[in-house]
Amino acid sequence: MEYDIHPDCMPDYLDPGELRALQLARLQATVQRCFDNVDLFRQRMNERGLTPGDIRTLDDVSKLPFTQKTDLRDTYPYGLFAVPMKEVVRLHASSGTTGKPIVVGYTKDDLDVWSSVVLRSFIAAGLHAGDVLQNAYGYGLFTGGLGAHGGAERLGAAVIPISGGNTDRQIMVMKDFGVTAICCTPSYFIHLIEKVNASGISFKDLDLKIGVFGAEPWTDAMRDYIQRESGIRAFDIYGLSEIIGPGVGIECSEQSGIHIFEDHFLVEIVDPRTDEVLPAGEEGELVITTLTKQAFPMIRYRTHDITSIVPERCACGRTLCRINRIRSRSDDMMVIRGINVFPSQIESALLSVEEKLPHYQILLTRKSGLDQIEVQVEVTEEMFGDRIRELETMQKNLAYAIEHTIGLRVPVRLVEPHTIARSEGKAKRIIDKRSEGEEIR
């Protein structure tokens, strides 16, 4: 089969043998760079009696030490950099909501790689030169805004650097500027859907065709809702600041898994409890090694994202491996009375009852030494006017769906319209008040 391939996208279709050889050469070079320039990595290699020469095959990556998010904070700000600061041309950082922020750096070559993988991402999602992209990811230290921006400009799209927030202006720009594609968090686009519908504008009157959504886990049911309500095609882009930012991988037109740009990122799936590497098809924690990063290479970085590798080749023709969409994070897991609960399970249960995803929050408290969980679901204006009996029926149906999904009876409380705070970035789904002391009811 022949493909009309953009020059940047040639690696998407490499012969698997050629790809593996390229990965090995790049892995060996990265391990040598880290051994020579990163004290923590060299120390851990020495503790294991390893040298860069011991990495002879791709499978040998399992011999290497893991890197954790705590390592990035413990070596703040530049302790894991592998180049002198005079070669660093840009710095980004995490929000710093828990402890010190994570600082990441880029050389000129790193920025070139970053814009290339984001370009490949947009092409996989169906964007072309000439598209008008409304970039509603946050600019600044967050990697989303500038990461998407660079790839879109390289593609030849017209980028509107609107950043997040100011929803009324977002809608005005979407309509007046002839926006054909948008990128933001999926939860914020759901907020946009709500606002567009309230404004009297129809998505049919807009030129919007494609949405590229990331920065938070979201479900297939959430995608179905977005596509049904807006008429666009919604694609899941994957990335994280510690690896490069957006552009580690994305769904293609098949929407059947996230293609990882393997010429730059080597992925493994490990059992989060035993650290054992799992075969394709088995679910576990995603571990990523960067193969071309110069300023801030990562060796076996534990993402805490739970997924699995799809063993079959994609019908789109790309030879890149795919991972299933991230269903949850291991560090988002709540253990309630001995049962593991993920927010995505709650979301799927709610969507099984309501066609439209309701605004919801999960409230965690502690009473008499036991963890308590409550799901608060916001009713719409239409529901709010319903009779009490109908609301009670809905409440029971929601509670039953959650119990059926997670095997735990969870109280559901319906709250009035617009009482749950809206998000212009990542949705805050969990409110954890267990550290505030026991709640007396």
Image: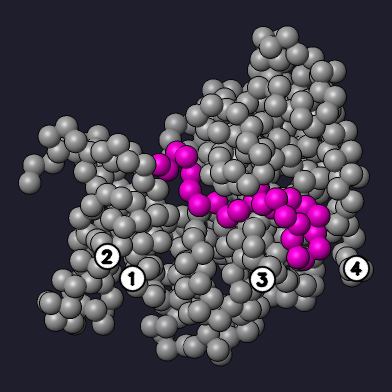
Residue sitting nearer the eye, 191 or 346: 346
Position in image of residue 76 (x %, y %)? 57, 26
Query: Does residue 42 appear left or right of residue 173 in this picture?
Result: right
Position in image of residue 248 (x %, y %)? 69, 49
**Could you tell me how far apart the alpha carbons at marks 4 and 3 are, in whole angstroms?**
31 Å
Instruction: Give the SS element for disc 3.
Output: strand
Q: Earlier in the sequence, mark 1 or mark 2?
A: 1
Which amino acid, by three-letter code, is at mark 3? Leu
**Could you tell me how far apart the alpha carbons at marks 3 and 1 are, in whole angstroms?**
34 Å
Q: Which quadrant would the N terminus be assigned to in this image? A: bottom right
Residue sitting nearer the eye, 105 or 40: 40
Identify the residue at image location x=77%, y=66%: 316
Dot 3: few (<14), some (14–19), or many (≥20) neighbours within 10 Å? many
Dot 1: few (<14), some (14–19), or many (≥20) neighbours within 10 Å? some
Q: Which residue is mark 2?
A: 398
Dot 2: few (<14), some (14–19), or many (≥20) neighbours within 10 Å? many
Q: Earlier in the sequence, mark 1 or mark 4?
A: 4
**Could you tell me how far apart the alpha carbons at marks 4 and 2 are, in whole angstroms?**
48 Å
Q: Which residue is mark 4?
A: 1
Query: Does residue 398 appear left or right of residue 8 in this picture?
Result: left
Mark 4 in CB contact with mark 2 (< 8 angstroms):
no
Q: Which residue is mark 1?
A: 353
**Could you tell me how far apart the alpha carbons at marks 3 and 2 are, in whole angstroms?**
37 Å
Dot 4: few (<14), some (14–19), or many (≥20) neighbours within 10 Å? few
Query: Does residue 211 appear left or right of residue 393 in this picture?
Result: right
Which amino acid, by three-letter code, is at mark 1? Val
Chain part drawn in magenta = 309-333
Q: Which residue is mark 3?
A: 133
